Image (spheres, coloured by chain):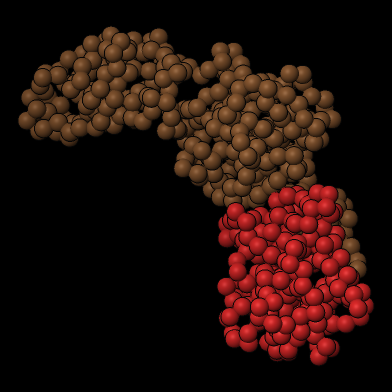
Chain colours: A red, B brown
């Protein structure tokens, strides 16, 4: 579907403006999305992470399955400019598949924390994008629509969007660039993300713990 | 933390993608007011569309019970409905509410004109696979073809194939355009899982038939056939073209219209109503519902000689449908 949409857009007189919108959006999301290597190896355990805004500390949120406990707490985080720094897992939430990584040595040049959106305000059919490293391809953008709205305490957001291994831990965002979820799995072809309010709760709880 | 822009507000000019996004979300909201969830099978419920006053259209293959079917309305409340009739050929079923829902709970589907089906147009599949609300997937119409006949004999006005992902609740749901108007009823069971849409015109025809008669009339002869080529010497002797072919009758059902008309196993039908017959499908195409009760003039080769037969076209019984599938007509 994505390629067919690309063709439809390419033939449209609106193409230039739409393409510019998407380019701008991809560039903004690349600045808040890191690449995570768990073992130092190039493709062994590659995932994505989001530079999460926090009053104290320099943090990246990713999936627990990107940094499972059996691999230890060390992680290697790579920014859009391909520089790598060592980081440490400071909290994990297995139930919600979330992990929090602290980067004390985060260079100021990296600092572009994400804008967080409200997943509860999202509308079914609304266009959303995902940024990640599907099959190791860095900084890839995919486009889709919200499939089902999270209702009540529902922690998961379902999107009709094409994701692949390597998207895990990366952002699902609105066209405004606001992160509404952290992509965590593919279920029956649907992209599933942990909604932003669940992530925010996890981060604030992790930061208040002694 | 800052919140994203509030939903429902119009994007400023110059952000065309955002305007499209708003349109798509608005289309889902609008169409969703007419899409219901039907609890008539184990596990995952299927979708349906509020088509006429008190009447819901669904995909027949998703309906496994006939009475006291629970239906989740657009406002999340539940109502009860009964199966009025179904047509396996087009995979359409019609349900009637015990009492018509209020306009607040469910609104009639707003249907687009038939010429709105265009290859390449952006469309949404809107479904309701349960009580959790409406769902959507985005894609394009990939094919708009001619009238076609399904493997189980149903006639569908246009062949409409979709390029989009099929999720739970797809069948019986609505295909909608960017304005939220319904283009047809979605179905994944008519072509090996390929997502298709049954256009509004076909749905209307089937709904009419099911509401008035409880079933869809389908012409029926009671024969099984396969294509054959005649030998050159036989074709020459009978003054047929050299490439003449026909369809060989390999089975005649007892007491069927074909049996009563004198058709025998081994006959080769070379023409029907003056049209050359080369495939069993050619015979099937002459058997529209309007032919029931009418005459079909056949020209057959029997024992090396030409013979003319006149058959009275019958109506296919409902109970025998499952046994009479395939190349039989």
Q: Is residue A100 left or right of residue B289?
A: right
Q: Quadrant of residue A25?
A: bottom right
At horizontal 72% and vertical 61% (from top left) the residue drawn is A193
Residue at the spot 69% in from the left edge and 82% down from the top edge: A72
Residue found 77% across the figure and 72% down from its top: A92
Counting every numbered tag in the picture gives 0
Residue B283 shows in this picture:
yes
Left or right: residue A17 versus residue B103 is left
Instruction: List x then y, in percent, for residue B32.
Output: 74, 39
Residue drawn at x 61%, y 22% is B66
From the image, which quarter does the N terminus of chain B lie in?
Answer: bottom right
Q: Can you tell which quarter of the image residue A171 is in?
A: bottom right
Give coordinates of residue B244: x percent, y percent. 18, 31
Q: Quadrant of the C terminus of chain B?
A: top left
User: How far across and how far down the image is residue A53, in percent?
Assistant: 86, 75
Question: Viewer-proximal residue, B1 or B27?
Answer: B1
Residue A147 in the image, given as x and y percentages of width and height: 70, 51
**Left or right: A203 in relation to A63:** right
Residue A78 in view, yes or no? no
Q: Quadrant of residue A161?
A: bottom right
In the rendered view, tell whether residue B63 sits above or below residue B31.
above
């Amino acid at each position: 579907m994505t390629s067919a949409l690309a063709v439809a857009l390419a033939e449209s007189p609106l193409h230039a403006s739409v393409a510019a919108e998407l380019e701008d959006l991809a560039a903004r999301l690349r600045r808040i999305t890191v690449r995570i290597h768990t073992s130092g190896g190039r493709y062994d355990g590659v995932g994505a992470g989001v530079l999460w805004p926090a009053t104290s500390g320099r943090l990246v949120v990713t999936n627990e399955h990107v940094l499972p406990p059996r691999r230890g707490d060390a992680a290697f985080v790579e920014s859009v400019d391909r520089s790598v720094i060592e980081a440490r897992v400071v909290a994990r939430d297995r139930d919600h598949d979330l992990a929090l990584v602290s980067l004390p040595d985060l260079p100021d040049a990296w600092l572009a924390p994400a804008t967080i959106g409200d997943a509860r305000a999202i509308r079914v059919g609304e266009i959303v994008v995902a940024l990640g490293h599907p099959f190791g391809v860095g900084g890839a953008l995919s486009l889709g629509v919200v499939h089902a709205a999270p209702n009540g305490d529902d922690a998961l957001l379902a999107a009709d969007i094409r994701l692949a291994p390597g998207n895990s831990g990366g952002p699902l965002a609105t066209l405004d660039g606001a992160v509404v979820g952290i992509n965590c799995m593919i279920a029956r072809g649907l992209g599933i993300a942990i909604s932003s309010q669940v992530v925010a709760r996890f981060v604030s709880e992790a930061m208040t713990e002694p | 933390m800052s919140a994203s822009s509030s939903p429902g507000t119009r994007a400023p000019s110059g952000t065309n993608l955002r305007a499209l996004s708003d349109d798509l979300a608005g289309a889902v909201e609008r169409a969703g007011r007419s899409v219901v969830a039907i609890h008539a099978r184990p596990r995952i419920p299927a979708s349906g569309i509020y088509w006429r006053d008190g009447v819901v259209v669904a995909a027949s293959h998703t309906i496994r019970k006939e009475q006291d079917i629970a239906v989740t309305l657009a406002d999340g409340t539940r109502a009860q409905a009964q199966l009025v009739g179904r047509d396996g050929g087009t995979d359409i079923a019609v349900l009637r509410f015990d009492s018509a829902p209020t306009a607040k709970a469910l609104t009639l589907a707003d249907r687009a004109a038939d010429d709105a089906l265009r290859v390449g147009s952006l469309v949404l599949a809107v479904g309701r696979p349960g009580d959790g609300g409406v769902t959507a997937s985005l894609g394009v119409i990939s094919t708009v073809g001619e009238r076609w006949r399904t493997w189980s004999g149903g006639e569908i006005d246009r062949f409409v194939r979709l390029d989009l992902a099929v999720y739970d609740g797809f069948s019986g749901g609505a295909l909608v355009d960017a304005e939220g108007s319904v283009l047809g009823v979605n179905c994944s069971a008519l072509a090996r899982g390929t997502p298709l849409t049954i256009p509004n015109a076909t749905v209307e025809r089937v709904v009419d038939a099911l509401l008035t008669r409880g079933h869809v009339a389908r012409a029926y002869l009671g024969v099984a056939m396969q294509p054959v080529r005649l030998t050159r010497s036989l074709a020459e002797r009978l003054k047929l073209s050299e490439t003449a072919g026909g369809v060989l009758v390999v089975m005649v059902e007892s007491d069927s219209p074909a049996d009563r008309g004198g058709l025998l196993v081994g006959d080769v039908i070379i023409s029907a109503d003056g049209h050359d017959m080369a495939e069993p499908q050619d015979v099937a195409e002459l058997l529209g519902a309007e032919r029931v009760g009418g005459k079909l003039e056949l020209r057959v080769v029997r024992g090396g000689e030409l013979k003319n037969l006149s058959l009275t076209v019958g109506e296919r019984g409902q109970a025998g449908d499952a046994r009479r599938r395939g190349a039989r007509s």
